[in-house]
Each structure stands twice: as C-alpha cells, then as structure tokens.
Amino acid sequence: MTRLGLANGPNLGRLGQREPALYGTATLAEIEAAAVEWGRERGVAIEAFQANGEGALIDFFEAGVGRLDGAVLNPGALAHYGWALRDCIAALPYPVVEVHLTNVFQREPFRHRMVLAAATVGQITGLGAIGYQLALEALYARLQGGAWASQAGQNLQGGGQP
Ligand code: DQA
C-alpha cells in the first residue's frame, strides 16, 4: 500500500483559531481528516503529524525512511530558516512537496527566503487548504506513472542554491 506523510510544522496545530483571515477557518484536524479520506478513495495510507519543534519533524521524516513513499510538508516559519530540516529533506530517499497556505511572496520580506525549497521536489504556495490535496495528488501521480507523472526539471534537483 502506498503511504504518504502529511507533516505540519510550528503553529499549524492552531489552524482554525490562528489568524483565520490569513490562514482560513479549517482546523488541522479537518485538513488531516480530508487527507485520510482522499487516501481512502485511492488506497493510499496517510500518516499525519504535527510538531512545533524542528527536531521532532526531523525525527518524523527519518522514521519514514523505508516506510513512506513521499510526504507533504507545511514547515511553517521553518521554511525561512530551518537549515537542519533542509539537510534532513535533502538526504531523504523519498520526495517531499512543500505547501504554504498563504502566498509567502506577497508577505513580509523575511518570508521570501525559502531555505527548504531547493531540497523539495516542488512547492505549492498561496492556494489555501486545497494546496495540501494538490500536493498529495502530485505525489500520487509521480508514484502511479503515466502522463501526469512526466517530470520536468528534475535534472536540477539538489543543484539549486537557496
Ligand atoms: C505558512 C507561511 C509561513 O511563513 C508561516 O510562518 C506559517 C504558515 C503558510 O502556510 O502560509 O506558519 O507556512
């Protein structure tokens, strides 16, 4: 059975209450339940995880080696300074897609620096909660093969400078 991780970083456990005008009203539990339902319809197991600490996220991704086929990650603010998490993702044998609910490039300048992005296979930013589903679809398509799995720019992977 295909297994995909769904990891969320600091402050995302408070989705629904946290600045809803920015991040929306859906709770993380609702988003995780929607992902599990998405997986059930496709025969994909979803392993959901949230932590406020960088180390716990690294532990989750390391524990996924040999078990997960891919993962979706909203790293929260770690996207902008999480170098240890970046090194972890760069060394994983499975692909990670980065998701942000908000369009970080429309926000404060400190959010424009994306230190994980070059270690991930791609990013979805600014589309709200459906970004998680789109990221899961992208990982699933990669694993299924066929036209949607056709890769572009993968020769660049790991070569980008943050
Ligand atoms: C976020 C964007 C980050 O800059 C911020 O620190 C978050 C949420 C998003 O989903 O839009 O915690 O990752």
Image: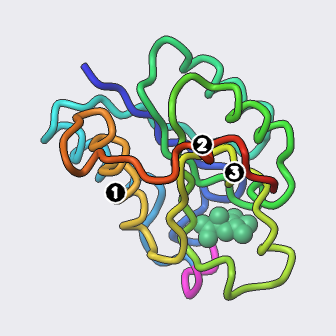
- Point out the frontmost of discs 1 and 2: 1
Q: Amino acid at mark 2?
A: Gln
- Point out the frontmost of discs 3 and 1: 3
Indicate the quadrant where residue 96 lies: top right
Q: Nearer the viewer, residue 58 or 69?
A: 69
Q: Residue furthest left?
A: 41
Residue 108 appears at what percent x and percent y? Answer: 81, 84
Residue 104 appears at what percent x and percent y? Answer: 67, 77
**Is the residue under label 3 in contact with that under label 2 (CB below 8 Å)?**
no
Label disc, if present, on residue 50 of the rendered structure: 2
Indicate the quadrant where residue 25 lies: bottom left
- Separation of disc 3 and disc 1 at Cα? 21 Å
Does the magenta-highlighted stretch encompass residue 21?
yes
Q: Secondary structure at mark 2?
A: strand
Which image quarter is the N terminus in?
Answer: top left
Does the magenta-highlighted stretch encompass residue 85?
no
Q: Residue furthest front?
A: 155
Q: Would you name the residue on which mark 3 appears?
A: 118
Residue at 47% x, 42% y is 6
Q: Would you name the residue on which mark 1 appears?
A: 133
- Point out the frontmost of discs 2 and 3: 3
- Separation of disc 2 and disc 3 at Cα? 22 Å
Q: Is residue 57 visible?
A: no
